[in-house]
């Protein structure tokens, strides 16, 4: 795969949130506000890039039959570093994300990329892949976060828009399920449409 | 009484899947048939109960006296991975029927965030749990997970045959269903 292809892969073609449907727990749990969503996305990106890099460097050393345990240990180490950094630098966000920060360890995107990409590719490509997947995840989370915050608390990145009675169901878990489901359906619809028009064009050309 | 409150809270009020949003991956992935969802639910409940005891004990009697709480996450995930492996070996040795029923789900449980989630919730200082309440919370959070999973499977078995708009097929309709279930579970809020 070319560099450019790897870099775009995570953002569009295999977007972790809407295409691969991985890491659904944080996607639904922390997207009550846009700021929390962005923070969660960046936290996952940090761990993803670091663990991809480390696993790619160690890929020839790790024995095949204990690789999952080794990957989880590497990921857990970076999550712990992240927890310590956030606790001292950003205590408010640290408490807002709660147990979902340590739960990054079991986020399937990170283990998934370690297994599917970093354990088979070089360091530079693995870092690019980590960034791409991380940015795709961050963008999707922020999109969900902005929508839920706008509808559920009537504000945009904590900036109040003066809505008198926002629909508070959207900041509850139920609203998270609805927004995520509807966004995924919209994306499916667009994909079907563009596929259809591409097929039509092909037919016409023939 | 204290334990009754923990049980009602874990199963209904703070249902792991529908109120706390933990364990969504298996909730969406393994909820297509009722029998497989029951199997998955039992396996998760078992691991959650055992993991709660071990992680709580390790945290209270080893990590806290040594001031090592900051490596909690690493220790917990390794304990869970080892427990899942041991559970697999024991079940395989003693009951082949149970192993055949649960076998495929066991490795998946390590990365189920409900298990690590309950371990981390049990050691939250503000809850002030002891070893027994951690165990009760672990087991009944698992029961709550199973309840949500089985209910979801029951609904999905019906929606398979219904005429869902093309763009909503698969995950989107499952998420909308989960949203409606989550709204229904809101009725329990404030009970405890």
Image: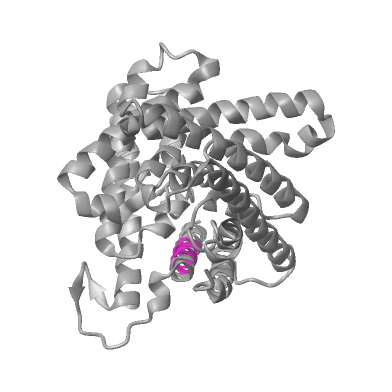
Q: Who's the residue at 26% across and 37% down the image?
A: A82
User: How would you classify the magenta stretch by its main secondary structure?
Assistant: helix
Examine the structure image and report whether residue A192 is included in the region drawn in magenta: yes
Span colored in magenta: A180-193
Along the line of sight, the residue nearer the viewer: A97 or A206:
A97
- Residue A19 location, x and y as percent? 47, 52
- Residue A3 location, x and y as percent? 29, 33
Q: Who's the residue at 49% across and 51% down the image?
A: A21
Along the line of sight, the residue nearer the viewer: B13 or A118:
B13
In the picture, measured across the screen, residue A72 lies left or right of residue A41, that is right
- Residue A91 location, x and y as percent? 20, 50
Q: Quadrant of the N terminus of chain A?
A: top left
Q: Who's the residue at 54% across and 64% down the image?
A: B175
Examine the structure image and report whether residue A182 is included in the region drawn in magenta: yes
Can you say whether B33 is above or below B119 in the image? below
Along the line of sight, the residue nearer the viewer: B84 or B137:
B137
Q: Quadrant of residue B161?
A: bottom right
Can you say whether A111 is above or below B172 in the image? above
Q: Taking the image as drawn, is residue A85 in sight?
A: yes
């Amino acid at each position: 795969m070319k560099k450019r292809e790897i870099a775009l892969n995570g953002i569009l073609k295999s977007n972790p949130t809407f295409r691969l449907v991985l890491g659904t727990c944080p996607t639904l749990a922390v997207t009550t506000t846009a700021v929390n969503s962005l923070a969660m996305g960046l936290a996952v990106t940090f761990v993803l890039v670091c663990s991809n890099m480390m696993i790619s460097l160690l890929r020839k050393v790790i024995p095949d039959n204990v690789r999952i345990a080794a990957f989880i240990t590497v990921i857990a180490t970076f999550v712990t570093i992240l927890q310590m950094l956030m606790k001292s630098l950003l205590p408010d966000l640290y408490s807002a994300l709660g147990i979902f920060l340590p739960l990054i360890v079991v986020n399937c995107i990170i283990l998934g990329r370690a297994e599917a990409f970093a354990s088979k590719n070089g360091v530079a490509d693995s870092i690019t892949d980590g960034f791409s997947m991380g940015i795709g995840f961050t963008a999707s989370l922020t999109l969900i976060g902005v929508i839920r915050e706008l509808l559920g608390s009537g504000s945009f990145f904590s900036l109040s828009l003066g809505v008198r009675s926002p629909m508070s169901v959207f900041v509850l878990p139920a609203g998270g399920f609805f927004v995520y489901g509807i966004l995924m359906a919209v994306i499916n619809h667009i994909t079907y449409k563009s596929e259809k028009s591409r097929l039509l064009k092909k037919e016409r050309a023939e | 009484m204290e334990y009754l409150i923990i049980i009602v809270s874990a199963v209904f009020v703070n249902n792991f899947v529908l109120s706390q949003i933990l364990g969504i991956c298996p909730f969406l992935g393994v909820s297509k048939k009722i029998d497989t969802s029951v199997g998955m639910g039992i396996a998760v409940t078992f691991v959650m109960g055992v993991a709660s005891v071990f992680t709580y004990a390790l945290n209270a009697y080893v990590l806290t006296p040594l001031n090592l709480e900051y490596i909690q996450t690493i220790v917990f995930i390794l304990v869970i991975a080892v427990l899942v492996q041991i559970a697999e070996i024991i079940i395989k040795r003693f009951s082949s029927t149970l192993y055949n029923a649960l076998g495929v789900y066991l490795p998946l449980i390590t990365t189920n965030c409900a298990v690590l989630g309950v371990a981390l919730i049990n050691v939250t200082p503000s809850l002030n749990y002891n070893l027994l309440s951690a165990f009760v919370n672990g087991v009944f959070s698992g029961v709550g997970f199973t309840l949500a999973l089985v209910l979801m499977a029951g609904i999905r078995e019906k929606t398979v045959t219904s005429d869902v708009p093309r763009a909503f097929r698969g995950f989107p309709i499952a998420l909308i269903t989960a949203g409606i279930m989550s709204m229904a579970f809101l009725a329990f809020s404030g009970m405890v």
